[in-house]
Image (cartoon, helix red, strand yellow):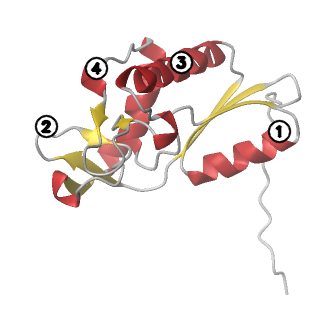
C-alpha cells in the first residue's frame, strides 16, 4: 500500500540563496514563513504595513508602495473613543502614533523602505488569508485594519474570485 502521492516537479533555474532579497506580503502565513527566512539570516522584507488578510487591501498596499504614495492628513484618523492614537485604515497599529505627524511619518517611512527594497527584490511572496473585506460604510473604502473601532462603521462582504485576482 502506498501512503504517498508522488509529484514530479520540474527543476527550475530560479534559486534562492543568501544573496537573495525576499519580500513577503499578506496573511500570517507570510509573517511565519518570512520569520523562518529571517531566523536563517536571509535578507527579508515582511509586511511593511502589517499583516493583511484580504486581497483588496493587499493590492492597495502594494500599489501605494509601487507608486511611492506620500501619506498625508487625509489618510489618518484619531481614535477618540479609546486611546487617542492616530491610525491609518491601511496599516497595522504598529504604524499608529501619538500624534498625526508621528503616524504619517511612520507610514511614509514604511512606504519608502519597502519601495527601496522591492526595487532590488529577487522574489516576492504573496499569501491570501480571506475573501472577506471590511468597507467603511460612509465612504465605501476597504480597510485593512479596523483598529477596534465601532463595528457599525463597517460592512463586511465576501469578494468574488474575479475581485480577488
Q: Judging from the image, what secondary structure is the residue with disc 1 in? A: loop
The answer to whether any part of residue 103 appears in the image is: yes
Q: In the structure shown, which secondary structural element does the residue marked by tag 4 occupy?
A: helix
The residue singled out by tag 2 in the image is: 139
Q: Split into 4 quadrants, where in the image is the C terminus?
A: top left
Q: Are marks 2 and 3 in contact (CB under 8 Å)?
A: no
Residue at the spot 28% in from the left edge and 20% down from the top edge = 73
Q: Is residue 165 visible?
A: no
Tell me which numbered mark, 2 or 3, is placed earlier along the sequence. 3
Disc 1 residue crowd, few under 14, some 14–19, many 20+, Cα 10 Å: few
How far apart are labels 1 and 3 at the CA level?
A: 39 Å
Answer whether labels 1 and 2 touch (C-beta < 8 Å).
Answer: no
Horizontal and vertical percent for residue 149? 28, 53
Q: Residues within 10 Å of mark 2 (few under 14, many from 20)?
A: few
Nearer to the camera, 82 or 73: 82
At horizontal 43% and vertical 37% (from top left) the residue drawn is 91
Q: In the drawing, does residue 34 fall left or right of residue 136? A: right
**How would you rate the neighbour count of disc 3 (Cα within 10 Å): few for under 14, some for 14-19, many for 20 or more?**
some
The disc placed on residue 109 is 3
Q: Which mark is residue 73?
A: 4
Instruction: Name which of mark 2 and mark 4 comes first in the sequence.
Output: 4
Secondary element under disc 2, as helix, strand or loop, is loop
Amino acid at each position: 500500500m502506498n501512503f504517498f502521492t508522488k509529484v514530479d516537479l520540474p527543476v527550475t533555474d530560479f534559486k534562492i540563496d543568501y544573496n537573495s532579497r525576499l519580500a513577503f506580503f499578506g496573511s500570517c502565513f507570510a509573517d511565519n514563513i518570512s520569520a523562518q527566512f529571517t531566523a536563517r539570516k536571509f535578507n527579508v522584507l515582511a509586511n511593511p504595513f502589517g499583516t493583511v488578510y484580504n486581497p483588496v487591501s493587499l493590492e492597495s498596499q502594494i500599489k501605494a508602495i509601487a507608486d511611492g504614495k506620500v501619506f498625508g492628513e487625509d489618510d489618518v484618523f484619531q481614535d477618540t473613543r479609546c486611546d487617542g492614537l492616530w491610525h491609518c485604515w491601511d496599516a497595522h497599529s504598529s504604524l499608529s502614533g501619538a500624534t498625526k505627524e508621528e503616524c504619517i511619518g511612520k507610514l511614509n517611512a514604511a512606504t519608502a523602505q519597502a519601495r527601496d527594497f522591492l526595487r532590488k527584490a529577487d522574489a516576492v511572496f504573496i499569501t491570501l488569508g480571506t475573501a472577506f473585506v471590511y468597507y467603511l460604510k460612509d465612504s465605501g473604502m476597504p480597510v485593512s485594519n479596523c483598529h477596534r473601532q465601532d463595528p457599525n462603521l463597517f460592512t463586511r462582504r465576501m469578494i468574488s474570485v474575479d475581485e480577488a485576482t
